[in-house]
Each structure stands twice: as structure tokens, then as C-alpha cells.
Image: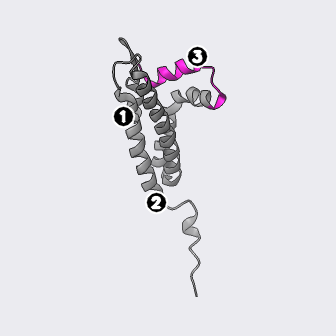
Amino acid sequence: MLVGTFLPWLRSGRISRNSYELAGVGVRRLQAADWVEAPLRAWPYLGLLWAVAVVVMILGRPWIAGWLAAVLAGLTGLVALGGLVLVVRLDSVMLSGLLIGPLLTAAGAGVVLIASVAILRRNSPPGAANHPPDSVG
């Protein structure tokens, strides 16, 4: 999934741009609402956020890591799908074909989201072992 963010997302002529370059262009050029600009400004920190999720998992906190990974995968997948929509809509105007970056990122986000759900289903929330369910009589 992260590899896809570094691959080309947009190509115009001989110039290719990855997701980080596109986010930078979006921040500089778009006069967008705060809810659009905030994710664009946060996009360069995506790798760091994923590293935090991995470290949390290594430290033995699968419940927290699972939730963090699920949220990050959902957000990353939404951005990648948005990138796909943009590429498809612009393709007839200026692009030389669909690019692998948003496809790989969206597919990777889907796989990570499924894995996160599996981690959450397999691991109980913190403190759950200390409070067994009530038994009937």
C-alpha cells in the first residue's frame, strides 16, 4: 500500500507525479475548504503513522494497532479511490493512461483493512479478560 503512494499517480506528457507531489500541488493551488486541505497537508506523514501502527503491534498491543491500522487503511483507501476517480475523469483530456499508483494503494488499503478486522476479531479489547461475561444461573 505505501509503495503505491510513491508510484506515479498522474502523468501529463513526460511528467509523472506521485501522491505526495499531488498533495503538495493541491495545498499550493487549490483554494479548498479546511476539510479538504487538512488531509492533503497530513498526507506526507502517512509513512510515519503506519510506522507507529507497526511499533504498537510489536509492543504487544494488537487491539490498538488493529484500530489504528483500520482507520489509516480506510483513509488511505479513500484517498486512493479519489485519485483513481481523478485519473479516470482527466484521462480523456490530458493523461496517457491509468497509472498503477492509486490502483496499488487502493488494493493494499483493502488488504490491510481486512487484516485489521481479523486482528481485532482475534484479540479482545484491553480489560476484557478481567471482566468475564455474566453467567445465567
The mark tally for this picture is 3
Q: Give the mark, 2 or 1, whose residue is nearer the N terminus.
A: 1
Verify whether residue 128 appears in magenta.
no
Q: Secondary structure at mark 3?
A: helix
Looking at the rendering, the stretch of residues picked out in magenta corresponds to 17-35
Q: Which three-letter amino acid code belongs to the residue tagged 3? A: Arg
Q: For mark 3, does the 10 Å Cα neighbourhood hold few (<14), some (14 to 19), or many (20 or more) residues?
A: few
Name of the residue lying farthest toward the top = 14
Tell me if residue 137 comes above or below residue 50 in the rendering.
below
Q: Would you say 26 lies left or right of 122 here?
A: right
Name of the residue lying farthest toward the right = 34
Q: Position of residue 7 (x, y in %)?
A: 37, 25
Q: For mark 2, does the 10 Å Cα neighbourhood hold few (<14), some (14 to 19), or many (20 or more) residues?
A: few
Which quarter of the rendered picture does the N terminus lie within? top left
Which quarter of the rendered picture does the C terminus lie within? bottom right
Q: Which residue is mark 2?
A: 121
Q: Position of residue 104 (x, y in %)?
A: 36, 34
Disc 2 versus disc 1: nearer the observer: 1
Q: Which residue is mark 1?
A: 104
Q: Which three-letter amino acid code belongs to the residue tagged 1? A: Leu
Q: Give the mark, 3 or 1, whose residue is nearer the N terminus.
A: 3
- Residue beneath the point at 58% across and 16% down: 28
Q: Which residue is mark 3?
A: 28
Whether tag 3 and tag 2 are in contact, CB under 8 A, the answer is no
Could you give the CA–CA distance between mark 3 and mark 1, rounded to whole angstroms?
Answer: 26 Å
> What's the coloring here?
one colour
